[in-house]
Image: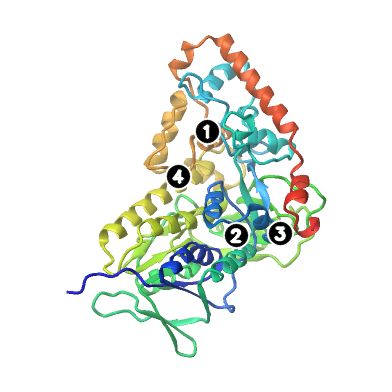
Amino acid sequence: MTAPQPIRSIVIVGGGTAGWMAAAALSRLTRTGVRVTLVESDAIATVGVGEATIPPIRSFNGLLGIDENEFLRRTQGTIKLGIDFQGWDHEGDRYFHPFGEFGFDIEGVKFHQFWRKLHETGAASGIGDYNLCAMAMKLGRYQPPSTDPGSVSSRMAYAYQFDASLYAAFLREFAEARGVVRQEGKVVHVPVRGEDGHIEAVVLEGDRRIEGELFIDCTGFRALLIDQTLGAGWESWAHWLQCDRAVAVPCAAPDETITPYTRCTARTAGWQWRIPLQHRIGNGYVYCSGDISDDAAREMLLANLDGKPLRDPFMLKFEAGRRKLAWHRNCVALGLSSGFLEPLESTSIHLIQTGVSKLMALLPDTGFSPVERDEYNRLTDTQMEQVRDFIILHYHANRRTDGDLWRRVREMEIPETLRRKLDLFRNRGRFFRYEDELFAESSWIAVMLGQGVYPAGWDPLADAIDTAQIQKTLDRIRTIFAQTASTMPRHEDWLARHAPAGRFA
């Protein structure tokens, strides 16, 4: 029997953000003689609305050696310090989910435990006053964090907001310069081997055949390879995440102010996103089609824009859930092909990124050992479930009185994994992360407190430190964070100086 050989040919089917992120990362293999081919069709449109991200994307760009300012210029990008949630707990309320940690732990006890103790008597202000990103968000300011861990500004954390189609084009240029070959054409047939059911090639219009050993499915909701060809199956989460449509439209930016955050505003049958770019604003309304008509959703979105629409609104239909097998036989699904969790916490690009990272770490040979495949699927399933629970939290922990959607999600049974987290936090504000969980403790704290999930008590260890000392420490943290944020340049001024694009160019 011939021993398995290293993979020498990888075929990525589908472009867009998922395809070109995969191609950019896998281009490193071309230096070892691996042939990386990306197949996409200009006839199949991709959605190029504004795209918001979370901080780990900086690691992905950094590993590729991408210059941050050039990237921002090329993608009309802006800085994102967190998310502004409006109306999620009840009509008229507002809270921030900022990146970065709250305060500083004291003698091994979590900061929020001391905050909870003092907030009981009114001696501590809102939790956002103890987060540097939240303070900068309020003021519309930004500057890069310090690399000195002793500096207060090192507590800053940030991500990006950019045009997804421009990002894909940027990565395409990067990947092609490093040996990735793009093949234009529409896939019309996917032959599989009879002996093991592995994909052996994709056939394009004109009977062009592209063979490969490892195939990556980036065909979006169609899941052309992983499901239509290999039948990996689908697990629906629509009973928890009930929104199933989105209508999106970009609009003109009304003035020179660019908020360094994404906004998510709760509506009667869902929620509306607002993603500010340098040249325009991306908008969309995610909603449950059983609670509002498509026409009414479209009108709701158009009535709540900051500027003139720049094109006709377009609609997306989807179902929340995941592929039962993200890696099946010799095919790995990335992006929408592997599953969909609505864009509430900006995880779409991150899930592509982690999929690529896991594939690189578990890259198979031609024997396709189930050991690597099974570990990839286990890690993917775990992360999808953890992100799913975090998104469900936003819906479930609401006290809105308008719309059947909000009543249903408030009253529904939630996953046991989320129930345990909520019960533990409601008791004494305790929280534990599992399996390298994506969202940090600070993120869970921000959302739970922001939506009224308030601990009944606090960790007894917080009582071991003198209350007056704690009071002075919290007052000092709040003052220093406010002063530091106020000295930062305005976000749009920083962009105009360091990464001008669009109206700043």
Locate the N terminus by quadrant: bottom left
Judging by the rendered image, the residue that carries numbered circle 3 is 299
Marks 2,4: beta carbons within 8 A: no
Judging by the rendered image, the residue that carries numbered circle 2 is 246
Toward the viewer: 243 or 164?
164
**Alpha carbons under labels 2 and 1: distance apart:** 28 Å
Instruction: In the rendered view, tell whether residue 58 sits above or below residue 46.
Output: above
Judging by the rendered image, the residue that carries numbered circle 4 is 389
Judging by the rendered image, the residue that carries numbered circle 1 is 445
Q: Is residue 197 left or right of residue 122?
A: left
Dot 3 surroundings within 10 Å: few (below 14), some, or many (20 or more)?
Answer: few
**Alpha carbons under labels 1 and 4: distance apart:** 14 Å
Dot 1 surroundings within 10 Å: few (below 14), some, or many (20 or more)?
Answer: many
Nearer the observer: mark 2 or 4; the answer is 4
Does label 3 or label 1 sit earlier along the sequence? 3
Does label 1 or label 4 sit earlier along the sequence? 4
Nearer the observer: mark 3 or 4; the answer is 4
